[in-house]
Image (cartoon, rainbow, N blue to C red):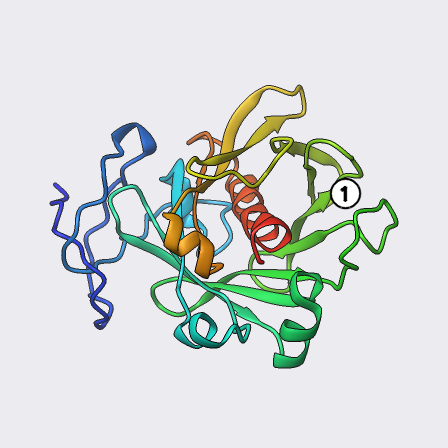
Amino acid sequence: MMQMKEYKEVPQDVPQDDTVVRQPTSADAVRIPSGPENWMSIPVGMPNCPQGLEYLTALDQLLVSQKIEKLELLTGFETKNRFKIKNSLGQNVYFAYEESDCCTRNMLGRARPFEMKILDNFQNEVLHLTRPFRCDLLCCFPDCLNAVEVSAPPGQVIGTVEQVCTFLRPKFNIKNSFGDTVLHIEGPICPCKCFSDTNFKVLSANNEEIGKISKQWSGLGRELFTDADYFSVTFPLNLDVRMKALIFAALFLIDVVYYEH
Protein backbone atom coordinates (compact mmCIF):
# COMPACT_ATOMS: atom_id res chain seq x y z
CA MET A 1 0.00 0.00 0.00
CA MET A 2 1.35 3.42 -0.91
CA GLN A 3 2.33 5.51 2.08
CA MET A 4 1.73 9.29 2.02
CA LYS A 5 4.82 11.16 3.06
CA GLU A 6 5.53 14.67 4.15
CA TYR A 7 6.55 16.81 1.16
CA LYS A 8 8.74 19.85 0.81
CA GLU A 9 10.74 21.34 -2.03
CA VAL A 10 14.20 19.94 -1.24
CA PRO A 11 16.40 19.14 -4.28
CA GLN A 12 17.76 15.62 -4.14
CA ASP A 13 18.48 12.65 -6.36
CA VAL A 14 15.50 10.84 -7.85
CA PRO A 15 14.73 7.87 -5.61
CA GLN A 16 14.68 4.40 -7.09
CA ASP A 17 11.37 2.66 -6.47
CA ASP A 18 10.48 -0.63 -8.12
CA THR A 19 7.00 -0.82 -6.59
CA VAL A 20 4.21 -0.28 -9.13
CA VAL A 21 0.88 0.84 -7.71
CA ARG A 22 -2.25 2.53 -8.99
CA GLN A 23 -1.88 6.26 -8.50
CA PRO A 24 -4.49 8.46 -6.80
CA THR A 25 -7.08 10.26 -8.90
CA SER A 26 -8.73 13.61 -8.29
CA ALA A 27 -11.50 11.85 -6.40
CA ASP A 28 -8.85 10.96 -3.82
CA ALA A 29 -7.22 14.40 -3.92
CA VAL A 30 -6.37 16.12 -0.68
CA ARG A 31 -4.34 19.20 0.14
CA ILE A 32 -0.77 18.46 -0.89
CA PRO A 33 1.29 17.90 2.26
CA SER A 34 4.89 18.86 2.73
CA GLY A 35 7.66 16.30 3.08
CA PRO A 36 10.48 14.52 1.22
CA GLU A 37 10.38 14.78 -2.56
CA ASN A 38 9.35 11.59 -4.31
CA TRP A 39 8.40 10.42 -7.78
CA MET A 40 5.36 8.59 -9.04
CA SER A 41 5.96 4.94 -9.93
CA ILE A 42 5.41 4.14 -13.59
CA PRO A 43 2.41 1.88 -14.33
CA VAL A 44 3.17 -1.24 -16.38
CA GLY A 45 1.27 -3.37 -18.87
CA MET A 46 -0.13 -0.48 -20.93
CA PRO A 47 -0.45 -1.63 -24.57
CA ASN A 48 -0.63 0.88 -27.43
CA CYS A 49 0.66 3.68 -25.21
CA PRO A 50 3.53 5.98 -26.26
CA GLN A 51 6.55 5.40 -24.06
CA GLY A 52 6.53 7.73 -21.06
CA LEU A 53 2.81 8.47 -21.18
CA GLU A 54 1.99 5.42 -19.05
CA TYR A 55 1.78 7.79 -16.05
CA LEU A 56 -1.26 9.48 -17.59
CA THR A 57 -3.21 6.22 -17.82
CA ALA A 58 -3.51 6.15 -14.01
CA LEU A 59 -4.32 9.84 -13.50
CA ASP A 60 -7.24 12.19 -14.01
CA GLN A 61 -5.55 15.27 -12.57
CA LEU A 62 -2.19 17.02 -12.92
CA LEU A 63 -0.88 19.93 -10.84
CA VAL A 64 1.56 22.25 -12.59
CA SER A 65 3.75 24.86 -10.90
CA GLN A 66 6.06 27.25 -12.71
CA LYS A 67 9.44 27.87 -11.14
CA ILE A 68 10.19 31.43 -9.99
CA GLU A 69 13.36 32.60 -11.75
CA LYS A 70 15.37 34.91 -9.47
CA LEU A 71 17.09 36.72 -12.34
CA GLU A 72 13.73 37.45 -13.94
CA LEU A 73 12.26 38.60 -10.63
CA LEU A 74 15.12 41.02 -9.91
CA THR A 75 15.80 42.40 -13.39
CA GLY A 76 12.73 41.72 -15.53
CA PHE A 77 15.02 39.82 -17.92
CA GLU A 78 12.90 37.05 -19.48
CA THR A 79 14.38 33.61 -18.82
CA LYS A 80 13.36 30.14 -19.98
CA ASN A 81 10.18 28.86 -18.36
CA ARG A 82 10.43 25.73 -16.22
CA PHE A 83 7.63 23.70 -14.65
CA LYS A 84 7.11 20.85 -12.19
CA ILE A 85 4.18 18.51 -12.82
CA LYS A 86 2.78 16.48 -9.91
CA ASN A 87 -0.14 14.20 -9.16
CA SER A 88 -2.75 14.89 -6.49
CA LEU A 89 -0.50 13.50 -3.72
CA GLY A 90 2.39 15.78 -4.60
CA GLN A 91 4.46 13.09 -6.31
CA ASN A 92 6.55 14.28 -9.25
CA VAL A 93 5.28 13.03 -12.60
CA TYR A 94 7.09 15.18 -15.18
CA PHE A 95 9.43 18.14 -15.50
CA ALA A 96 9.01 20.64 -18.36
CA TYR A 97 11.37 23.28 -19.65
CA GLU A 98 11.35 25.75 -22.52
CA GLU A 99 13.92 25.81 -25.30
CA SER A 100 14.25 29.26 -26.90
CA ASP A 101 16.95 31.84 -27.45
CA CYS A 102 17.54 34.95 -25.35
CA CYS A 103 16.85 37.39 -28.19
CA THR A 104 13.39 36.11 -29.10
CA ARG A 105 12.32 35.76 -25.45
CA ASN A 106 13.09 39.38 -24.62
CA MET A 107 12.21 41.02 -27.94
CA LEU A 108 9.13 39.05 -28.99
CA GLY A 109 7.68 38.23 -25.56
CA ARG A 110 4.63 36.00 -25.70
CA ALA A 111 4.71 36.02 -29.53
CA ARG A 112 8.01 34.11 -29.56
CA PRO A 113 8.52 30.67 -31.06
CA PHE A 114 9.71 27.99 -28.66
CA GLU A 115 10.05 24.28 -28.02
CA MET A 116 8.80 22.74 -24.77
CA LYS A 117 10.32 19.47 -23.60
CA ILE A 118 8.54 17.30 -21.04
CA LEU A 119 10.76 14.76 -19.25
CA ASP A 120 9.99 11.84 -16.97
CA ASN A 121 11.90 10.97 -13.81
CA PHE A 122 14.53 9.13 -15.87
CA GLN A 123 15.21 12.34 -17.83
CA ASN A 124 13.69 10.82 -20.97
CA GLU A 125 11.79 13.22 -23.19
CA VAL A 126 8.25 11.86 -23.46
CA LEU A 127 6.43 14.87 -24.95
CA HIS A 128 7.65 17.58 -27.31
CA LEU A 129 5.74 20.79 -27.98
CA THR A 130 6.50 23.11 -30.90
CA ARG A 131 5.04 26.61 -30.87
CA PRO A 132 5.74 28.73 -34.02
CA PHE A 133 6.02 32.52 -34.06
CA ARG A 134 2.69 34.32 -33.90
CA CYS A 135 2.19 38.08 -34.11
CA ASP A 136 0.94 39.56 -30.85
CA LEU A 137 -2.25 41.14 -32.22
CA LEU A 138 -5.93 40.54 -31.58
CA CYS A 139 -6.95 39.56 -35.09
CA CYS A 140 -7.98 36.54 -37.13
CA PHE A 141 -5.12 36.43 -39.59
CA PRO A 142 -3.49 32.97 -39.68
CA ASP A 143 -0.20 34.41 -38.42
CA CYS A 144 -1.97 35.74 -35.31
CA LEU A 145 -3.86 32.61 -34.22
CA ASN A 146 -1.81 30.62 -31.73
CA ALA A 147 -1.07 26.92 -32.10
CA VAL A 148 1.16 24.20 -30.70
CA GLU A 149 2.12 20.88 -32.27
CA VAL A 150 2.46 17.92 -29.91
CA SER A 151 4.67 14.86 -30.44
CA ALA A 152 4.87 11.69 -28.33
CA PRO A 153 7.46 10.32 -28.54
CA PRO A 154 9.41 13.24 -30.03
CA GLY A 155 9.16 13.13 -33.82
CA GLN A 156 5.78 11.38 -33.89
CA VAL A 157 2.97 13.95 -34.03
CA ILE A 158 -0.14 12.99 -32.06
CA GLY A 159 -2.08 16.20 -32.63
CA THR A 160 -2.28 19.97 -32.35
CA VAL A 161 -3.93 22.63 -30.21
CA GLU A 162 -5.16 25.58 -32.29
CA GLN A 163 -6.70 28.90 -31.30
CA VAL A 164 -10.10 29.73 -32.78
CA CYS A 165 -10.90 33.20 -34.11
CA THR A 166 -13.29 34.75 -31.59
CA PHE A 167 -13.76 38.19 -30.06
CA LEU A 168 -15.43 37.16 -26.81
CA ARG A 169 -14.49 33.93 -25.05
CA PRO A 170 -11.07 32.38 -25.72
CA LYS A 171 -11.50 29.15 -27.67
CA PHE A 172 -9.17 26.42 -28.85
CA ASN A 173 -9.62 23.26 -30.91
CA ILE A 174 -7.77 20.06 -30.08
CA LYS A 175 -7.09 18.03 -33.23
CA ASN A 176 -5.77 14.50 -33.61
CA SER A 177 -2.92 13.44 -35.88
CA PHE A 178 -5.33 13.30 -38.86
CA GLY A 179 -6.41 16.93 -38.38
CA ASP A 180 -9.88 16.06 -37.06
CA THR A 181 -11.23 18.23 -34.24
CA VAL A 182 -11.90 15.92 -31.29
CA LEU A 183 -12.13 18.29 -28.32
CA HIS A 184 -12.74 21.98 -27.64
CA ILE A 185 -11.50 24.36 -24.95
CA GLU A 186 -13.54 27.38 -23.94
CA GLY A 187 -12.37 30.05 -21.51
CA PRO A 188 -14.14 32.89 -19.68
CA ILE A 189 -14.81 36.28 -21.29
CA CYS A 190 -12.14 37.73 -19.00
CA PRO A 191 -9.30 35.19 -18.65
CA CYS A 192 -7.45 37.33 -16.07
CA LYS A 193 -9.14 37.45 -12.65
CA CYS A 194 -7.97 38.75 -9.30
CA PHE A 195 -8.34 36.73 -6.08
CA SER A 196 -9.96 33.73 -7.80
CA ASP A 197 -9.15 30.85 -10.11
CA THR A 198 -9.77 31.06 -13.86
CA ASN A 199 -11.26 27.98 -15.52
CA PHE A 200 -11.02 26.90 -19.15
CA LYS A 201 -13.61 24.18 -19.85
CA VAL A 202 -12.62 21.12 -21.87
CA LEU A 203 -15.57 20.07 -24.05
CA SER A 204 -16.23 16.95 -26.07
CA ALA A 205 -17.21 17.06 -29.75
CA ASN A 206 -20.83 17.18 -28.48
CA ASN A 207 -20.02 20.22 -26.27
CA GLU A 208 -20.26 18.23 -23.04
CA GLU A 209 -17.84 19.33 -20.34
CA ILE A 210 -15.38 16.52 -19.61
CA GLY A 211 -12.59 18.39 -17.83
CA LYS A 212 -10.98 21.75 -17.24
CA ILE A 213 -7.72 23.67 -17.17
CA SER A 214 -7.54 25.99 -14.16
CA LYS A 215 -5.17 28.89 -13.70
CA GLN A 216 -5.04 29.09 -9.91
CA TRP A 217 -4.73 32.34 -7.98
CA SER A 218 -1.27 32.21 -6.40
CA GLY A 219 -1.32 35.25 -4.13
CA LEU A 220 -1.02 38.97 -4.69
CA GLY A 221 2.78 39.16 -4.49
CA ARG A 222 3.43 36.29 -6.89
CA GLU A 223 0.80 37.54 -9.34
CA LEU A 224 2.07 41.14 -9.36
CA PHE A 225 5.81 40.61 -9.48
CA THR A 226 6.30 37.33 -11.36
CA ASP A 227 4.84 35.41 -14.30
CA ALA A 228 5.28 32.11 -12.42
CA ASP A 229 1.83 30.52 -12.24
CA TYR A 230 0.00 27.55 -10.76
CA PHE A 231 -2.26 25.41 -12.96
CA SER A 232 -4.28 22.25 -12.65
CA VAL A 233 -5.74 20.11 -15.40
CA THR A 234 -8.43 17.46 -15.04
CA PHE A 235 -9.76 14.93 -17.54
CA PRO A 236 -11.66 11.61 -17.43
CA LEU A 237 -9.62 8.71 -16.09
CA ASN A 238 -10.60 6.50 -19.03
CA LEU A 239 -9.85 9.10 -21.72
CA ASP A 240 -7.39 8.03 -24.41
CA VAL A 241 -3.86 8.79 -23.22
CA ARG A 242 -3.06 10.83 -26.34
CA MET A 243 -6.05 13.06 -25.71
CA LYS A 244 -4.89 13.53 -22.11
CA ALA A 245 -1.47 14.56 -23.45
CA LEU A 246 -3.06 17.09 -25.83
CA ILE A 247 -5.15 18.64 -23.05
CA PHE A 248 -2.02 18.82 -20.92
CA ALA A 249 -0.14 20.50 -23.80
CA ALA A 250 -2.95 23.07 -24.19
CA LEU A 251 -2.10 24.31 -20.69
CA PHE A 252 1.29 25.59 -21.86
CA LEU A 253 -0.25 27.40 -24.84
CA ILE A 254 -2.84 29.06 -22.60
CA ASP A 255 -0.08 30.09 -20.21
CA VAL A 256 2.03 31.86 -22.84
CA VAL A 257 -0.95 33.51 -24.55
CA TYR A 258 -2.71 34.90 -21.47
CA TYR A 259 -0.35 34.80 -18.48
CA GLU A 260 3.17 35.40 -19.76
CA HIS A 261 3.20 39.16 -19.01
Q: Residues within 10 Å of mark 1 (few under 14, many from 20)?
A: few
Look at 59% across and 19% down and name the residue there: 208
In the displayed structure, does residue 16 sit left or right of residue 77?
left
Between 245 and 199, the residue placed more toward the observer is 199
Badge 1 marks a residue whose secondary structure is loop
Query: Does residue 38 appear to the left or right of 192 in the view shown?
Result: left
Residue in view at x 48 percent, y 77 percent: 75
Residue 13, position as x, y percentages in the image: 22, 72
Residue 191 vertical placement versus 256 (above, below): above
Residue 89, x across and y down, in percent: 24, 44
Outermost residue, right direction? 141
Given the image, on which type of amino acid does mark 1 rest?
Gly
With 1 as the anchor, is 133 left or right in this view?
right
Of 60 and 134, which appears nearest the observer? 134
Q: Position of residue 195 (x, y in %)?
A: 42, 38
- Count of numbered labels shown in the rendering: 1
The vertical placement of 108 against 137, above or below, is: below
**Viewer-proximal residue, 160 or 213?**
213
Residue at 51% over, 53% down: 50
Q: Which residue is mark 1?
A: 179
The percent position of residue 3, horizontal first and vertical second, equals: 11, 45
